[in-house]
């Protein structure tokens, strides 16, 4: 008896987009199904390294393409690991909700499913572009039962127990009436050689009474000489290993010989995947040993800040019988990792010489690459060198640290930065007043990682890296402006601190402000206001919240006037009101929410009305 099941709601939305969207190259579906079949063979081949009996029925791994012109069907078969009932439900009936939601949203925004489908791991569903029904018969290696999965891609799917002698999967596509070209053997040869020629397993075209024909060359692309490989062959291999539909932004093919030998064929995508910032996102490089696929889950093959890199590493020196856990801690693995990272960073440094081209990479992956400044002690300065930042020097073009240094005057030995949520708010932060006055450039940093990496890289090429809040001594200079009386100013600070004791730790005069009457900061060495907000937004404990300091500008007319009013008790209510407004003003400038929005809005309106009355 068949189990009738509905697709997860988000899968229905996604299928509707895939089936009904216009594709410039529908034949991509065959590449996806062949790629999945290759992965299934890889998985069983790996399991057989430690459990040889599990693949004893399989024989030589291969992928068979069988067109049936009379029935208008196309079947893709493999003798790989296969699936059981739970696998069918998990992999073909549901998709990670967040991923599918992003997929649907991106297609709605961009109007192109073709470029996005590979990014969301839904390559199998592309079969419904050409098929009105898909029937899968599969048997998992090491299990007795076989299963059939059937769906028209619209109203759910059915699963029934089936009969199948050997492990593997047969995917039978019942083609739509206007897709008869996919049973044409000449056309099928063209598609396979164009998109799947590099697949390591034989792709066999079943010609019926005429026999079988091996279509692909089956050579491991990375083992060939770079001069023999075309750009299109590199691009197609990238699409195979990444399951993306774009071309790579960067291709890096290298071979290392000496004490340890290994080959790498690595790619950086043009676009960031939807799951780049998911907490469990790991690198997806595939590890091979002498062209034998081992795993794509070796976490120590490449550091996590390079998790966007796709491709393969193949080594002749790692023993085949080594366990996955031992691989993670192998000294040889550490050498491979170090060499791979070094080559990637050197290549990125070369590409960074072309600013416009490099910005295509930086906008997608820069925030991830900067994690390496914090995480990678050995390479942090190299990563910092190819990192770019917003700056008070330019509202459009980002700047590197080296470019910043080149603009410093001869006496400046410090790189200054400020952190916050919004670049435009940062540009107008009162703490930058003195820097603007003295013509000192400040880096504007609005990403979470920017709160952490300067703590582990306090110096860069002989220049200290400091938050603007640490620059009190550096910002002093002679000023001829009128200043509040020292005694009255001290009383005003004391009074304001008393009025605001529930929100700030102290009130102090500062020389850093010019046009602004107040600013909000924290004690030197404590958690910044930006980091505190980040932690609150992520529901993290703030038991060690920073001591807030309200800095006042003794040269500002408003502060001078308040200091003059401080000795007259008749002014107490007015001073209290203005003090509260000044704190709110400082909060707004810092990107913080005001304590009492209604009070703030009312008082601002009153003062504006007085001004225009």
Image (cartoon, rainbow, N blue to C red):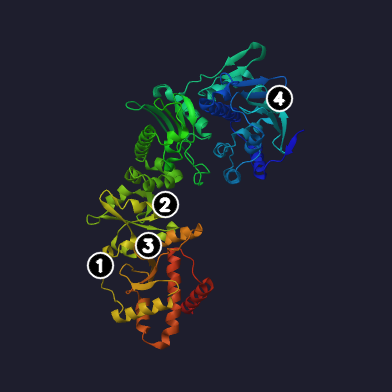
Query: Tag 3 or tag 2, which sits nearer the N-term?
Result: 2
Q: Secondary structure at mark 2?
A: helix
- Camera-nearest residue between 554 and 266: 266
Taking the spot 34% from the left edge, 65% from the top edge, the residue there is 433
Return the mark for residue 91: none
Q: CA distance from mark 3 to mark 1?
A: 26 Å
Nearer to us of marks 3 and 1 is: 3
What residue is shown with label 1?
A: 477
Please give the label number shown on residue 526.
3
**Near-viewer residue (138 or 431):** 138
Q: Nearer the viewer, mark 2 or mark 3?
A: 3
Q: Earlier in the sequence, mark 2 or mark 1?
A: 2
> In terms of sequence position, does the residue under pointer 4 or pointer 1 come before the other?
4
Q: Residues within 10 Å of mark 1 (few under 14, many from 20)?
A: few
Gap between marks 2 and 1 measured at Cα:
33 Å
Q: In this image, 299 relative to 439: left or right? A: right
**Residue 166 locus on image (x, y percent):** 64, 22
Q: Are marks 2 and 4 in contact (CB under 8 Å)?
A: no
Task: Say above or below: 189 vs 482.
Answer: above
Label 3, label 4: how far apart the Cα atoms are = 67 Å
Marks 2 and 4, how far apart in space?
54 Å
Q: Which residue is mark 2?
A: 449
Q: Nearer the viewer, mark 3 or mark 4?
A: 4
Q: Secondary structure at mark 3?
A: loop
Residue occupied by mark 4: 163
Position of the N terminus by quadrant: top right
Q: Earlier in the sequence, mark 3 or mark 1?
A: 1
- The residue shown at (39%, 63%) is 429
Instruction: Rate crowding at label 3 as few (under 14), some (14 to 19) or many (20 or more) other CA atoms within 10 Å.
Output: some
């Amino acid at each position: 008896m068949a189990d009738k099941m509905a697709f997860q709601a988000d899968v229905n939305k996604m299928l509707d987009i895939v089936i009904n969207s216009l594709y410039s190259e529908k034949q991509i579906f065959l590449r996806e199904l062949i790629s999945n079949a290759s992965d299934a063979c890889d998985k069983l081949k790996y399991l057989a390294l430690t459990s040889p009996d599990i693949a004893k029925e399989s024989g030589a791994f291969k992928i068979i393409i069988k067109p049936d012109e009379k029935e208008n069907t196309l079947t893709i078969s493999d003798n790989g690991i296969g699936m059981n009932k739970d696998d069918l439900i998990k992999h073909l009936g549901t998709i990670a909700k967040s991923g599918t939601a992003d997929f649907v949203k991106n297609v709605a925004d961009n109007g192109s499913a073709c470029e996005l489908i590979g990014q969301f791991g839904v390559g199998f569903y592309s079969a419904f572009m050409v098929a009105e029904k898909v029937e899968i018969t599969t048997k998992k290696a090491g299990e007795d039962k076989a299963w059939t999965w059937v769906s028209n891609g619209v109203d759910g799917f059915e699963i029934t127990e089936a009969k199948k002698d050997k492990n593997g999967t047969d995917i039978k596509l019942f083609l739509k009436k206007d897709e008869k070209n996919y049973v044409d053997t000449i056309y099928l040869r063209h598609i396979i050689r164009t998109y799947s020629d590099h697949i390591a397993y034989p792709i066999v075209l079943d010609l019926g009474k005429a026999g079988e024909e091996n279509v692909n060359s089956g050579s491991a692309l990375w083992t060939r000489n770079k001069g023999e490989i075309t750009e299109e062959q590199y691009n197609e291999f990238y699409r195979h290993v990444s399951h993306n539909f774009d071309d790579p932004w960067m291709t890096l093919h290298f071979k290392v010989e000496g004490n340890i030998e290994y080959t790498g064929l690595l790619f950086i995508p043009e676009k960031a995947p939807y799951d780049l910032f998911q907490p469990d996102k790991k690198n997806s490089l595939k590890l091979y040993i002498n062209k034998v696929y081992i795993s794509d889950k070796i976490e120590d093959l490449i550091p996590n800040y390079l998790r966007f890199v796709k491709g393969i590493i193949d080594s002749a020196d790692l023993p085949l019988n080594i366990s996955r856990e031992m691989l993670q801690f192998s000294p040889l693995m550490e050498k491979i990792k170090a060499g791979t990272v070094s080559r990637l960073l050197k290549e990125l440094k070369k590409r960074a010489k072309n600013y416009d081209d490099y910005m295509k990479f930086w906008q997608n992956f820069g925030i991830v690459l900067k994690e390496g400044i914090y995480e990678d002690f050995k390479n942090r300065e190299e990563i910092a060198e190819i990192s770019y930042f917003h700056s008070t020097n330019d509202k459009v073009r980002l700047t590197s640290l080296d470019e910043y240094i080149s603009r410093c005057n001869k006496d400046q030995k410090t790189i200054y930065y400020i952190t916050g949520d919004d670049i435009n708010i940062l540009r107008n932060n009162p703490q930058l007043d003195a820097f603007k006055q003295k013509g000192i450039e400040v880096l504007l940093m609005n990403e979470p990682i920017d709160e952490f990496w300067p703590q582990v890289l306090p110096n860069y090429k002989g220049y200290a890296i400091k938050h603007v809040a640490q620059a009190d001594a550096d910002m002093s200079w002679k000023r001829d402006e009128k200043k509040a009386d020292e005694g009255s100013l001290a009383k005003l600070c004391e009074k304001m601190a008393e009025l605001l004791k529930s929100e700030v730790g102290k009130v102090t005069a500062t020389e850093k402000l010019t046009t602004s009457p107040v600013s909000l900061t924290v004690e030197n060495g404590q958690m910044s206001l930006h980091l505190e907000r980040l932690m609150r937004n992520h529901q993290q404990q703030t038991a060690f919240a920073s001591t807030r300091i309200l800095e006042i500008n003794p040269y500002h007319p408003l502060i001078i006037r308040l200091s003059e009013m401080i000795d007259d008790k008749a002014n107490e209510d007015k001073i209290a009101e203005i003090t509260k407004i000044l704190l709110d003003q400082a909060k707004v400038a810092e990107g913080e929410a005001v304590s009492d929005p209604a009070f703030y809005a009312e008082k601002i309106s009153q003062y504006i009305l007085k001004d225009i009355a």
